[in-house]
Amino acid sequence: MKKQPIYLDRNENHFGPAPACFKALQKKNFFKLSAYSRDFARGVKSRLSERIAHDFGMDEKQVLLGYGGEDILKQAVHCYLKEGQKILIPQFSWWYYKAIADEVGGIKAEYPITEGDFSFYYDIDGMKDAVKKHNPAVILISTPNNPTGNAMGFGALHDFLSHTGDAIVILDEAYTMFFNTDRSYVKALIDEFPNLLIIRTFSKYYALAGVRIGFGFMGKNLSTFSKFSARYLGYNRLTERIALAALDSDDYYNDMRIKMVSDLDMFFKSFNQLPGFKAYRSEANFILVKIPEGIKDAMNAYLKERGYIIKFMNEDGLDQHVRISLGTQEENHMLMNLVNEFVAQHSGK
């Protein structure tokens, strides 16, 4: 039987969910499958939204649930972006941002992300200028950003949010917990900025992409979206149970996080020792690397032949780059060995 390729191009978490998530699936309860949730009778959407609200110290009514983070993102754009209105997105960003805008006839405008010596960073003044120039109805911020891996610190984020006017601001924090486990700022931002929606997911850090669980926090001006996204018959009771088990498994995920941060550093140092390569610091579960010109096809073929798939970028300004999702520590080190072998074999060509 042919060995399955190792996909390091999808930003999935190869460490897998905490053991408690599998134990949660083993609990048999006919009622959980055959009956709708009755959590609404207690004045909450679900046990999961109730738990998240408790963990973040906010009112449960400010917490949203969705079929993955992108479900909430898509709903929000469809709710607040009308045909002909502008949506402001990062210069380098997830392709899905543009796709959602196209679905409602929105006009896409970009704000700058600047390349530094060994990292990308948000140009806050440039972002403010873009708001003045375009007067967008919706602004998307991804921190950490995909594919560049850079994050925006609280001070810079607060500064920018103070200059967004009446726009609806969607803060995509899908990757934030790999480097940032602080929860305290979430309530502070939501309370201060009523047009702010913060989106998170169980797909990345919690390694639960396959069960599709997203959640978010909304400011007080987003009551329309609260109704737009409501599910009066409740949510998936099995995925809710799995998510709750993940939230109870801090030790497992913290150990995983430490290993991933270590391997990000390994990739950063190793690639930057290779002639013509340039790796950028990342605060997500992937790393962006600029590769020498003329080797893309050969490198892609070499790695694929050995069962490793990474993302070869073709976006404007990033067409000479690869994005590598972190795998297990064994997979990460094996990939780096293969890259070193490839470079050694092709250095004289």
Image (spheres, helix red, strand yellow):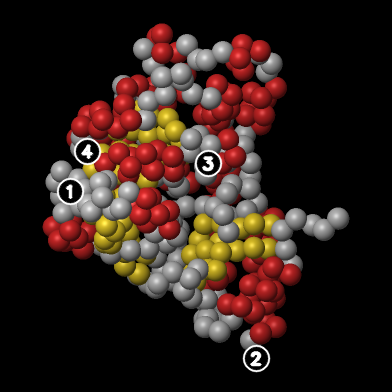
Q: Residues within 10 Å of mark 4 (few under 14, many from 20)?
A: many
Query: Would you say the residues marked 4 and 1 are in contact, meaning their CB atoms lie under 8 Å apart?
Result: yes
Question: What is the three-letter code of the residue carrying label 4?
Answer: Asn
Question: What is the three-letter code of the residue carrying label 2?
Answer: Lys
Nearer to me, 238 or 288: 238
Q: Which residue is the site of mark 2?
A: 349
Query: Would you say the residues marked 2 and 3 are in contact, meaning their CB atoms lie under 8 Å apart?
Result: no
Tell me the mark number nearer the camera, choosing from 2 and 1. 1
Q: CA distance from mark 4 to mark 3?
A: 25 Å
Total labels: the figure holds 4
The percent position of residue 217, horizontal first and vertical second, equals 33, 33
The percent position of residue 207, horizontal first and vertical second, equals 58, 41
Q: CA distance from mark 2 to mark 1?
A: 52 Å
Give the residue displayed 19% in from the left and 45% down from the top: 167
Give the residue displayed 63% in from the left and 41% down from the top: 16
Circle 2 — which element? loop
Q: Which residue is the site of mark 4?
A: 195
Q: CA distance from mark 1 to mark 3?
A: 29 Å
Q: Which residue is the site of mark 1?
A: 164
Find residue 203 and name its label.
Answer: 3
Q: Earlier in the sequence, mark 4 or mark 3?
A: 4
Tell me the mark number nearer the camera, choosing from 2 and 3. 3
Question: What is the three-letter code of the residue carrying label 3?
Answer: Ser
